Amino acid sequence: MCGRYRRRSDKQRIAEAFEVGMGLEDLYLEPEDDIAPGSVQPVVFANDSGDRQIGMMRWGFKLPERLLFDARSEGIERTPFWKDSSQQRRCIVPADAIFE
């Protein structure tokens, strides 16, 4: 994944695009043009009952020595660090553009 992305869509547009019905009430989103790893951003995820919900999450895994935020899709299911997350904790990151 690229190191930066842009999100211009508001919460209603995101909810419509990804069929989100929960988590919208208390969410206020400003458009952002330069979103970096480590920032807290909206994501769409399946809650415990399987319904799509929008919520704020930190982009990346904060490790003691660094922030880990990208991986190659090839072999991700065999890499110990990424295996569980790629199988059990997937989410959709609403973005309007990506750039290096």
Image (cartoon, helix red, strand yellow):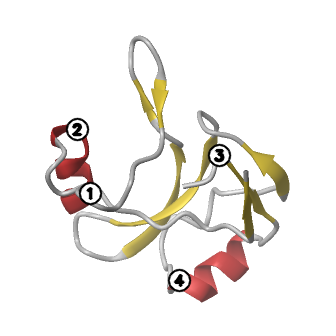
Of the two numbered discs 1 and 3 in the rendering, the one whose residue sits closer to the viewer = 3
Helix, strand or loop under label 1: helix
Q: Quadrant of residue 52?
A: bottom left
**Which residue does the image show at 35% across and 61% down from the upper left?**
73
Q: Earlier in the sequence, mark 4 or mark 3?
A: 3
Single out the residue that lies furthest toward the top: 65
Disc 3 marks which amino acid? Gly
| Circle nearer the N terminus (4, 2) | 4
From the viewer's perspective, is the residue at label 4 or at label 3 nearer?
Answer: 3
Q: Are the two marked residues, 1 and 4, in contact with CB atoms closer than 8 angstroms?
A: no
Q: Which residue is mark 3?
A: 3
In the rendered structure, the answer to whether residue 89 lies left or right of residue 83 reads right
Q: CA distance from mark 1 to mark 3?
A: 19 Å
For the residue pair 76 and 97, the one nearer the viewer reads as 76
Estimate the x, y position of residue 100 in percent, counting from the top left: 73, 51
Q: Which mark is residue 81?
A: 2
Against 50, residue 26 (above or below) is above
Residue 7: horizontal and vertical position, in percent? 76, 63
Q: Amino acid at mark 2?
A: Phe
